[in-house]
Amino acid sequence: MELVNFILTTTYFTSKGVIYKQKKGMAMGSPLSPIAVDLFMEWIEEEAITTAPLNCKPSLWKRYVDDVLEVIKRGEAENLTNHLNQVDLTGSIKFTYEEESNSSLPFLDTLIIKKPDGTTKLCIYRKPTHTDQYLQFDSHHPLHQKLGVVRTLLDRKDTIVTETEDQRKEELHIKQALARCGYPEWSINKVKADKENPKPKVKPPKDSRERSKGLVVIPYVEGLSERVSRIFKKHGFSTSMKPHRTIRNMLVHPKDKRDPLQSAEVIYEIPCQNCPKTYIGETGRLFETRLTEHKSESEKVSAKSFTRSQRKASASEIHKSAIAEHVAHQNHVIGWDEAQVIDQESDKTTRWLKEAIWIRKFE
């Protein structure tokens, strides 16, 4: 429990060179945060529902993250909300409520409508601020991703909307919204045809040699990436494409730039100042630590006063890195100030592969 408490309260971050500690709440981006928060919310729910007065005890309680759908007696919404806000003594969690209006109530992407006969139907709910802006059809993305937008909207229509007439209206709305985003009619018809006549699933062969050898993520370049993907497929590799440059990564930089020397899990280059050769290496530790090791060993080699016999002896020694070998054999000066990180990869095997590619590139 002490370890868990340490992890949950260690919420440090930097901004403009200043170190801050988040005093309240969980760290955003931590994989542990949603788990701990969900456990806390489950505890609040159990306490609140168990101790709720009979007159405002909910007969239905459904929660998804921070949205709750509940059924209680008419006129008791405020009493239940006040009770919920008394459970958490820290005051960190605050409940608000919204009652049904015109016999309808939104919950997530669903609009629950109560019909005159007392039954309910479901439609798609869109906030008043919704703009119907989706991925533009003329954007630099592979075709299957654009068709995926169409499929997602049609799947949502078929999954959520319960009545045929409402499904027809929703499909018309989807067509009009996609048309404004440049989608031709054939793209929608193609997805509908694929949904109506899905291709039969083929079981993978039992021979493991014929199964997929892994996933390769490649940047998308129109016309080129599709051909590369087909080549990978012939050799048993699946491919996934991602944008090479986006407006977001060109304009938005919310985090402080990290000092390259303080980066870990990197591939780096260290050039020689006396010849065109460049050393390419990788490390899972801080780049500064590895660079210091290279520099220390090379300085030990270069600090020696060599006679001809000493030079031959040093050249025959086995040194820890190719940089020290280069200094021992050529007596060249290494450009430590020009050393830089050229790639970053957290997976060790992938990092080794990238290192080999960079070495080949600099040959």
Image (tube, rainbow, N blue to C red):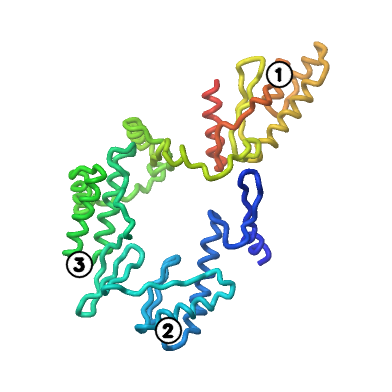
In the picture, the disc for residue 163 is 3
Q: Identify the amino acid type marked 2.
A: Lys
Mark found first going from the N terminus, 2 or 1 = 2
Q: Identify the amino acid type marked 3.
A: Glu
Please identify, in this view, whether the residue under mark 1 or under mark 3 is nearer the observer. Answer: 3
Left-right relation of 268 to 124: right
Please name whichever residue, 222 or 328, is drawn nearer the observer in this view of the structure: 222
Q: Secondary structure at mark 3?
A: loop
x then y, percent, for residue 150 = 26, 49
Please tell me which residue is depicted at 69% across the width and 32% down the height of the picture: 291
x then y, percent, for residue 204 = 34, 48
Discs 3, 2 touching: Cβ within 8 Å: no
Residue carrying label 1: 333
Please name whichever residue, 43 or 327, is drawn nearer the observer in this view of the structure: 43
In which quadrant will I find the C terminus?
top right
Residue carrying label 2: 57
Please tell me which residue is depicted at 52% across the width and 29% down the height of the picture: 357
Image vertical order of residue 15 relative to residue 55, above or below: above
x then y, percent, for residue 310 = 81, 16
Please name whichever residue, 258 or 235, is drawn nearer the observer in this view of the structure: 258
